[in-house]
Image (tube, helix red, strand yellow):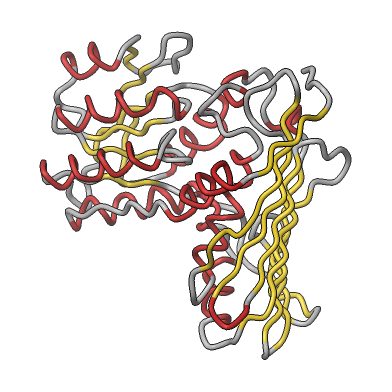
Amino acid sequence: MTATEPMKIAIAGVGKIARDQHIPSIAKSPAFDLAATVSRHASVEGVDHFETMETFLAARPDVSTVALCVPPQVRFEMARAALEAGRHVLLEKPPGATVAEVHTLAGLATERGLTLFATWHSRFAPAVAPAKAWLADKNIRRVEIIWKEDVRRWHPGQEWIWQAGGVGIFDPGINALSILTEIMPQPVHLTGAELEFPQNRDTPIAARLSFAGAGGVAVTADFDWRQTGPQSWDITVETDGGTLYLGAGGATMAIDGKEIRQGPEAEYDGIYARFAELLRAGSSEVDVSPLIHVADAFMLGKRIVTDPFIE
């Protein structure tokens, strides 16, 4: 890839997240050209389309990069096939259904000299980097995360999120955990969890988490998919130098109540800019720390059965 020649990229999985975010960001990126799609059920007008990863890989050796936007339960085999065929791979979050399979893909990418990028789009929200910089020299005392939204609004008809491996409320909740693991100067670990499972579903609709870290820092997170009205994506960090507040999923920031305005939301533009940097450098970026917190929640979590969820 040169400064004037975009790299051909394929999208696997032409669903809501691909249409809402990936396709528009690729269209705006000078580094990429959408050359193919892989999907059993959908396509993009004017773009070469394939129903399976195998047929795409055989027919389009000129497309060297693949963005995987399929559900995590089916992502591993597609990612492995792409890497084994010599293609660079971008993974939508969460990067896999298990931590182990992501480690396997990272090892394969290293072995083949390819780029693997496990993305966390919320880390590219405009206030996240300033928040990380502000917290770097602070002693953190307490962190409170409130992440509540309406599943019917954001995931209409997406049955995979309720099936084993779909992670349920952690599909949005992991966005908060990706910000937490990015901005904290020192890591924290999970100490307890309560997970609410609708009696007719395999994954939780709500979760309450507790974390601890060095110096006595305490972190709580409250995730819920039953929020109606205004949606809540908020993180409050109390420190020895004041209180930091991140709102709107990391789009806004305030210190001791004084708002510090940030730029416009362009998380996926940031993802593709970062992917281009990794490709130019011939390196990978695979951070599984948010996924480890989710795995730990399922290991430590107390299961609470709640009312059935009906779409």
Q: Is residue 39 left or right of residue 84?
A: right
Q: Is residue 24 left or right of residue 152?
A: left
Q: Residue 140 placed where, x, y %?
A: 62, 81
Numbered-mark total: 0
Q: In front here: 14 or 4?
A: 14
Give the residue displayed 39% in from the left and 42% down from the top.
99
Give the residue displayed 40% in from the left and 22% down from the top.
74
Give the residue displayed 66% in from the left and 66% down from the top.
219
Q: Is residue 151 left or right of residue 159?
A: right
Is residue 291 placed above or below 306 in the rendered structure?
below
The C terminus lies in quadrant:
top right
Dividing the picture into quadrants, the one containing residue 127 is bottom right
Is residue 57 placed above or below 236 in the rendered structure?
above
Is residue 271 placed above or below 170 in the rendered structure?
below
Q: In front here: 25 or 142?
A: 142
Q: Residue 184 placed where, x, y %?
A: 53, 72
Dividing the picture into quadrants, the one containing residue 258 is bottom right
Q: Residue 298 placed where, x, y %?
A: 57, 41
Give the residue displayed 63% in from the left and 24% down from the top.
202
Give the residue at the far right of this rendering. Answer: 229
Q: Residue 208 placed where, x, y %?
A: 72, 50
Q: In front here: 202 or 255?
A: 202
Q: Is residue 158 left or right of residue 129?
A: right
